[in-house]
C-alpha cells in the first residue's frame, strides 16, 4: 500500500510517500490511521486531530470507514487551499 | 480543458484561443486569481503552491464535467499553477464560453468556488515570521455549498 502525505502532514511526519504492508486487521482508513499514530512522534502529532485531516483513496476523496487493501494509494492531507 | 503547470499563462492569448474556431460562442466569462501581498495583518513575501499530481487533474476534470452538465457551455478552461509565486503573480484562470452570458458567468463562478474546496492544492506562505500553511476558510466551504442546493 502506498501512503502519501501533503502540506503540514508531510512536514510533521517528515515523509512525503511511503510503501507499507498493512498489518493484519487493518482493513479501513481508520485502521491505517490508528496504525500510523501508534508509531508516535511526528505521526501521532500529525494525526491527533482528524477534523483537520482529509483523506483520498486512489485519488478520490474518502471517509474514515472506506475499505482499503494492499494495492491502494491512500493520501492524507489538510483541507485544500487552492484557487 | 485542464492545465496544471508551473509556468505563467497569457490571459489574453488563452481567451482568444478559446473562441477562435467556434463562432457559436457569444461570450466568455473569466476569473483570474492572483497572489496577494497580505494575509491578515502580515505581509506575504511569496507563497509556494503544493499539489497532488494525478488527483489534481482528476478533480479539476470532474469539476469541469459537472459545470458542463449544469450549463450549456461551448467550451471551458481551467489553468492552475503550482510552485513558488510572488505577490501579483497569476495563480489560476477559469474561463467559460457559451452562447449567452448567463451560463458563462454562472459556470465560471461555480468552477472557481468548487475548485477552491475540491482541488488538492495547498498554499505555504512566506512571511517575516517564517513560513506557514494557509488554513482553509469556512467562507470557501459556504461559497461551494451554495451550488449544492441548486
Image (cartoon, helix red, strand yellow):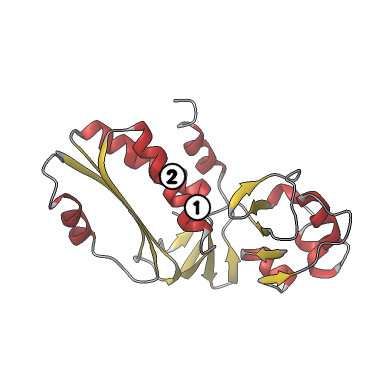
- The residue at the point 69 percent across, 51 percent down is A52
Q: Give the Cα distance between marks 1 and 2.
A: 9 Å
Left or right placement of residue B110 versus residue A20 in this view: left
Residue corresponding to mark 1: B119
The quarter of the rendered structure image containing the N terminus of chain A is: bottom right
Whether residue B56 is visible, yes or no, is yes
Tag in front: 1 or 2: 2
For residue B63, the mark is 2
List the single residue furthest toward the top. B150
- Ranked by sequence position, the earlier of labels 1 and 2 is 2
- The residue at the point 13 percent across, 51 percent down is B21
Residue B62, x across and y down, in percent:
45, 46
Q: Are marks 1 and 2 on the same chain?
A: yes
Find numbered disc 1 in the image and state the secondary structure of the residue it sits on. Answer: loop
- In the rendered view, tell whether residue B37 sits above or below residue B30: below
Find numbered disc 2 in the image and state the secondary structure of the residue it sits on. Answer: helix
Residue A33, x across and y down, in percent:
80, 56
Mark 1 touches mark 2? (CB < 8 Å): yes
Left or right placement of residue A10 versus residue A37 in this view: left
- In the rendered view, tell whether residue A64 sits above or below residue A14: above
| Disc 1 residue crowd, few under 14, some 14–19, many 20+, Cα 10 Å | many
Which of B68/B50 is in front? Answer: B68
Chain bearing tag 2 is B
Left or right placement of residue B137 versus residue A13 in this view: left
- The residue at the point 21 percent across, 34 percent down is B101
Amino acid at each position: 500500500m502506498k501512503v502519501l502525505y501533503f502540506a503540514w502532514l508531510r512536514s510533521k511526519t517528515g515523509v512525503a510517500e511511503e510503501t507499507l504492508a498493512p498489518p493484519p486487521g487493518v482493513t479501513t482508513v481508520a485502521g491505517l490511521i490508528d496504525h500510523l499514530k501508534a508509531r508516535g512522534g511526528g505521526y501521532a502529532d500529525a494525526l491527533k486531530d482528524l477534523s483537520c485531516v482529509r483523506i483520498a483513496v486512489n485519488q478520490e476523496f474518502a471517509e474514515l470507514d472506506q475499505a482499503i487493501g494492499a494495492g491502494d494509494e491512500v493520501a492524507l492531507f489538510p483541507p485544500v487551499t487552492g484557487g | 480543458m485542464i492545465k496544471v503547470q508551473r509556468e505563467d499563462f497569457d490571459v489574453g492569448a488563452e481567451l482568444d484561443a478559446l473562441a477562435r474556431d467556434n463562432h457559436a460562442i457569444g461570450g466568455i466569462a473569466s476569473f483570474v486569481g492572483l497572489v496577494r501581498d497580505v494575509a491578515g495583518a502580515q505581509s506575504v513575501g511569496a507563497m509556494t503552491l503544493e499539489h497532488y499530481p494525478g488527483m489534481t487533474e482528476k478533480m479539476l476534470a470532474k469539476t469541469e464535467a459537472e459545470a458542463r452538465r449544469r450549463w450549456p457551455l461551448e467550451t471551458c478552461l481551467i489553468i492552475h499553477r503550482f510552485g513558488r509565486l510572488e505577490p501579483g503573480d497569476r495563480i489560476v484562470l477559469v474561463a467559460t464560453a457559451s452562447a449567452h452570458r448567463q451560463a458563462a458567468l454562472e459556470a465560471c463562478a461555480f468552477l472557481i468556488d468548487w475548485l477552491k474546496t475540491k482541488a488538492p492544492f495547498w498554499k505555504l506562505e512566506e512571511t517575516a515570521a517564517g513560513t506557514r500553511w494557509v488554513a482553509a476558510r469556512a467562507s470557501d466551504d459556504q461559497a461551494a455549498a451554495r451550488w449544492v442546493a441548486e
